[in-house]
Amino acid sequence: MNYPENIAEKLGFHQIKEHIQAACLSPMGAEYAAKMKFSTRFPVVKQWVEQVHEMKQIMAEHGGEWPQQDYFDLRPWFAPLTLEGHYLAPEEWRDWHRGLDILYQVIRFFANIDSVKYPEIAKITQNYLNKEEEQGSNFRQIIPIVQELDRVFDINGQIKETASAALGDLRRKRFAEEQNLRKKLDSYIQQAYKEGWVSKDFSLTLRNGRMVIPLAAEHKRKIKGFVQDESDTGKTVYLEPADALVLNNEIKSLESAERREIIQILSRLSDRVRPMVPMLTAWYQWLGIIDFVRAKAVWAIEHDAILPHLKSIPWVDWKGARHPILEESLAKIGKKIKALDITLDDQKRIMVVSGPNAGGKSVTLSTIGLLQYLFQAGCLVPLTEGSTMGFFDQIFLDMGDEQNLENELSTYSSHLSNMRYFLAHAQEKTLLLVDEFGTGTEPSLGGAIAESILEKLADKGAYGAINTHFGNLKSLADRKQGLFNAAMRYDTTHLEPQFILDMGKPGSSFAFEIAQKIGLPNQIIENARKKLGKNQVDFDKLLMETETEKQIWEAKNTSLAVQLAQAESIKEQYASLKSHLEEEQKRLLNQAKAEAKQLVKDANQKIEQTIREIKEKSAEKEVTKEIRKGLNEFSEKKLKVQAPVTPSTPQKATINGPIAVGSWVAIKQADGEGAIGEVMEMKGKDAVVALGGIRTTIKLNRLEQVKAPKAEKSARSAMRGIDMNDRMAHFGLTLDVRGKRGEEVYVILDQYMNDALLLGVPEVRILHGKGDGILRNLVKEQLKRYREIKLVQDEHADRGGAGISIVTFK
């Protein structure tokens, strides 16, 4: 049994229950929602949450394929309808008409769903279908009733003239008699107009169900007949002429006959539905269940709730746990909730949470209690995938000020009363949640009592979480089996809570730091430090230093991770470039070999041809000379085309003057044959020199300025192209455009994206800031032009959020 009795209200479960109740489409579903409660039967809870999970999938796949409105509650008419002779009125049949039609459509939809893919939802429907087969009934019996209602009633719920042959005949006769009566009375009223017995604005009317003419009271004896009524002032009477009496009587008789025929029609319809009342009662119960499960699925979709892995034993392994009510409240003011990762297992069962006030300790407790209660009430829970949900027999909660004036209990006495109950009833499947454990009395005494109670609860094997500021409880958690420390993270630089739970270590209350931040005089703070004692001050100081160091190392780890990712990316790019160059080298060598073979072949052919010609000409001197000249010309031509150009070593000519960017320099060597290159960049006493295709950094005192060699200069400018090494070395994975004007951003971003695509990087970050969103929108619009982009999304909230766009390439 949960404790206290109003635990659902204290955790906020009643708000969620009201939300689900409002999401129901029918009164039947809302009744089920109102009965939601905590269950200790694991198979039942497992079935409930699996039903909701399957309904989520059905709604995603077939969301609009079954009716979502007009779920009329026909149950109030079932009992009266079972009485012989009772029949439903036309306006009641109007609701039945739509209600039965909707019921049939919903049954048919769920009767045809894939029972393998959605076994739990299919099981609900199949249970009712099987009961029908046993009773010899079938939900398809609804179709003839709906068809009959279509035949009898029009779209306004009025009985059609074609509902029966007798009704059609009676209505036609009544219409004819009314036409005759109208003609007769029109003649009387025309006479009255001529004689001045009635004004022009008077016309035929009905009184007591009979058609009459209005006359001025002083002229009522001018026409023979019967006065059926008179006006409030008595100045006008409504007269039924004597010769209209018979026609009015005939019309009244036909109306009575028509009413009797309508009653017969309604009675026949009621008699036809009466045997179906038990079946309809069962199907309306089923409709309420389906509607209730659908409403829970709607809530789950709205709050991104999932079905975690399930265990039938006490266990908590939650990732990304979010308090749904707090998350909804924060969303209304444009803020995001900080999700929690919480683990309680058989080795670490009770978590002792410490940290500063307003740091999120109470929210952590509420989140644990509400999510566990939600799950065991049959709801999906707002966690992320990979979470595991355990099962508890009871939840004990001690949270808030529980003063009881009636029983003269103070806040501390109330807490002790709760602890007495916890000690008496806690067991291995109990989830304990205690806020501000041990407070409300003298700290040393309260801490000692709290430590003794916590030891006993740990010995009982219970699970849970407690919040505290007491150092002795933090110390106990480090040495007592089953207990462990956790702390709410705190920004020691800005002295602000971060609402993130760190498990495995205690936290400081940061009382002195917070007091200093809000402006309490330093003298007061220092005096308090002295009064507290050196040991406690040193302990809090150590906790603060530990927290500060942890934040520093986390920041460094994040930075290193980014640098590592960049290095890996560059490594991959260089590996790809190396592979390309090796392939290109092989291709050029093969091409050179082929050209060399062809050259030798052509030369041999030419020599053989020359020898043959000399022999044929009998070695005449002049002819031989001409043939040799042709052979020499062939050799020179081939060598000019095929022979590789051997670059000559440039002759350096030393010049005086300071070395600057663009200067040609030579590396000083004893033999005077140092390599020559161009200065690309100055770095204090160093210079970045391009030696061919290689960039290297060299001390200025090792360089001497020389004249630029013409041949080298022209060759370099001709073959310059795109320096991939230079691009890779200077490319960064983050582009900062903050503070730039719109036209500048277009140029900078375009060049950056071209470089990123050229180098083949998988992902880049665009830092544009939040501000009014103008620069952010401009960047987003320009990125839409690149088809090579796979995804553009905001950075994580902890690392810049909407101020940074992450661009992922295909």
Image (cartoon, rainbow, N blue to C red):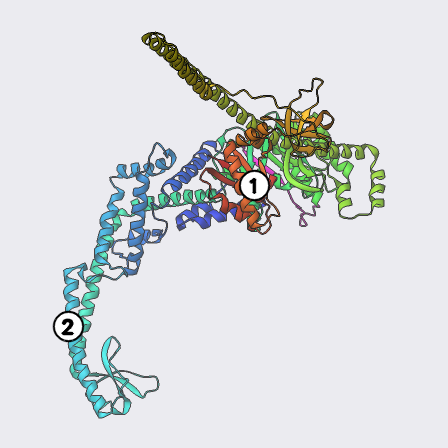
Q: Tell me: residue 650, above or below residue 352.
A: above
| Residue 499, picture quadrant | top right
Q: Which mark is residue 766?
A: 1
Q: Tell me: residue 197, above or below residue 401.
A: below
Residue 163 in view here:
yes
Q: Tell me: residue 109, above or below residue 162.
A: above
Name which of mark 1 and mark 2 comes first in the sequence.
2
Provide residue 451's location: percent of width, then percent of height. 72, 32
Provide residue 341's location: percent of width, then percent of height. 58, 34
Q: Residue 440 or 559: which is nearer the viewer?
A: 559
Q: CA distance from mark 1 to mark 2?
A: 84 Å
Kind of residue indicated by mark 1: Ile
| Residue 246, picture quadrant | bottom left
Q: Residues within 10 Å of mark 2 (few under 14, many from 20)?
A: few
**In this picture, which residue range is highlighted in magenta?**
390-410
Provide residue 751's location: percent of width, then percent of height. 53, 40
Q: Which residue is mark 2?
A: 176
Q: Residue at left 58%, top 27%?
A: 712
Q: Residue 639 or 342: which is nearer the viewer?
A: 639
Q: Secondary structure at mark 2?
A: helix
By secondary structure, the bulk of the magenta-drawn segment is best described as loop
Q: Residue at left 23%, top 55%?
A: 150
